Image (cartoon, helix red, strand yellow):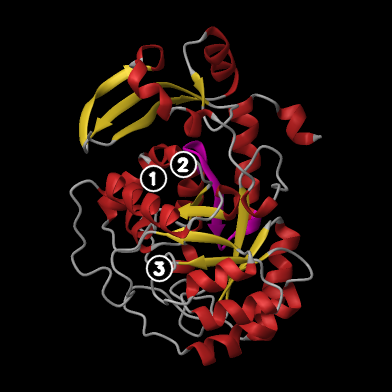
């Protein structure tokens, strides 16, 4: 039988969502408070049409629970911002970060503390640049860069280590990190799945075309980028056999995608909800946003980064990986107040 997939459409928030769900015209999206009014039926990769949730065929309804149920808490974490996503602050310990904020250990520690004060829930520490065309860094050098930063910041907050290398993962976990953020979804290093499993670590699995940042942007092509990312993430989650609360999935904005691919992934983010794991989006300061916003310099892409963060949140992102934590938290506060129609609650 061809594989069937339900894609939630027509998301509603606030009082409209509450009324629509209560009347049976909408279903809760990821446990609510948002709801969805429509679904696209996809069978064997083909679009079988869009129907109201009240008209989903009986033989398709078994696909609904992962979409309508509340998400597991990734790594057991509760967002500091009530009703909002987890905010993952980026701490680069690299001399060649695409965003222009690469620093040495002492400055990285100060940055991590500042991000926590600004409202970050997680600190994501990386010692190897993964910008398009970046040269690989030996694990020994990567460990030298990140270890003092992990040791200093892990007692203060949950720490994620942004790495493809099993040796770096093991060293960071031993130093206090609890989350692995791997752009290669544990495919680059054959020892990576074992390291994660033995440590009981939580993991972010990202989609990237291939496994090499040096070549990922060389003419990326997809028949349907959203479906291909869905299939990839589904297969990795199943292959690794990790429980949903220990897995977050990242569609990989900017990793082996054109501008059109990135926009399609943001727009169709709810498609991933059927996998039942939290969605992480890392669009902060990406070059594609700069092209859209007319901003060439990475460090000046705050406005397009905030727009992408809010678009992702509106479509079900449970984790936002960002450079500008304070501004992201401020924008989320306003967005949450507007979409829940509860200013008093946000001020409490």
Q: How far apart are marks 2 and 1 (CA)?
A: 7 Å
Spot occupied by residue 37 in the image (x, y as percentages of width and height)? 42, 19
Question: Would you say residue 87 sits in the magenta stretch?
Answer: no
SS for tag 1? helix
Q: Residue furthest top?
A: 23
Spot occupied by residue 63 in the image (x, y as percentages of width and height)? 41, 29
Image position of 31 (left or right of 250): right
- Determine contact: label 2, label 3, CB under 8 Å: no
Q: Closer to us: mark 2 or mark 3?
A: 3
Residue at the spot 64% in from the left edge and 24% down from the top edge: 341
When the figure is inspected, residue 74 is found, relative to residue 101, above or below; the finding is above
- Within 10 angstroms of label 1, few (less than 14), some, or many (20 or more) residues? many
Instruction: Give the residue at mark 1.
Output: 266
- Within 10 angstroms of label 2, few (less than 14), some, or many (20 or more) residues? some
Residue at the spot 60% in from the left edge and 59% down from the top edge: 88
The residue nearer to you, when weighing 213 against 46, is: 46
The residue nearer to you, when weighing 103 against 270, is: 270
Question: Would you say residue 322 sits in the magenta stretch?
Answer: yes
SS for tag 3? loop
The span shown in magenta is 313-326
- Determine contact: label 2, label 1, CB under 8 Å: yes
Residue at the spot 20% in from the left edge and 53% down from the top edge: 222
N-terminal label among 3 and 1: 3
Give residue 168's mark. none
The residue nearer to you, when weighing 217 against 70, is: 70
Instruction: Give the residue at mark 2.
Output: 311
Q: Closer to us: mark 2 or mark 1?
A: 1
Instruction: Give the residue at mark 3.
Output: 184
Q: How far apart are marks 3 and 1 (CA)?
A: 20 Å
């Amino acid at each position: 039988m061809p594989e069937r997939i339900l894609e939630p459409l027509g998301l509603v928030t606030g009082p409209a969502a509450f009324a629509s769900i209560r009347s049976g015209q909408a279903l809760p999206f990821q446990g609510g408070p948002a709801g969805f009014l429509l679904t696209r039926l996809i069978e064997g990769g083909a679009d079988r049409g869009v129907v109201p949730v009240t008209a989903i065929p009986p033989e398709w309804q078994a696909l609904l629970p992962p979409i309508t149920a509340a998400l597991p808490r990734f790594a057991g974490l509760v967002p500091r911002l009530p009703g909002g996503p987890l905010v993952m602050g980026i701490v680069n310990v690299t001399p060649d970060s695409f965003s222009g904020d690469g620093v040495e250990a002492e400055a990285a520690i100060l940055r991590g503390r500042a991000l926590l004060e600004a409202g970050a829930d997680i600190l994501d520490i990386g010692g190897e640049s993964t910008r398009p065309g970046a040269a690989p860094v030996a694990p020994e050098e990567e460990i030298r860069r990140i270890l003092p930063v992990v040791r200093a910041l892990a007692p203060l907050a949950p720490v994620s280590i942004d790495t493809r290398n099993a040796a770096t993962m093991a060293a960071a976990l031993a130093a206090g990190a609890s989350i692995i953020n791997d752009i290669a979804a544990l495919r680059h290093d054959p020892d990576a799945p074992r390291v994660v499993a033995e440590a009981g670590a939580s993991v972010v699995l990202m989609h990237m075309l291939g496994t090499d940042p040096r070549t990922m942007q060389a003419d990326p092509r997809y028949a349907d980028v959203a479906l291909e990312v869905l299939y990839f993430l589904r297969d990795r989650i199943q292959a690794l056999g990790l429980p949903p609360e220990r897995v977050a999935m990242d569609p990989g904005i900017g990793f082996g995608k054109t501008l059109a691919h990135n926009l399609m992934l943001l727009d169709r983010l709810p498609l991933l909800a059927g996998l039942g794991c939290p969605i992480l989006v890392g669009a902060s300061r990406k070059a594609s946003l700069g092209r859209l916003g007319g901003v060439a310099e990475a460090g000046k892409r705050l406005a397009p980064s905030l727009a992408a963060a809010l678009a992702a949140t509106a479509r079900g992102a449970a984790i936002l990986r960002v450079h500008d934590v304070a501004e992201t938290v401020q924008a989320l506060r306003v967005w949450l107040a507007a979409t829940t129609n509860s200013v008093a609650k946000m001020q409490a």
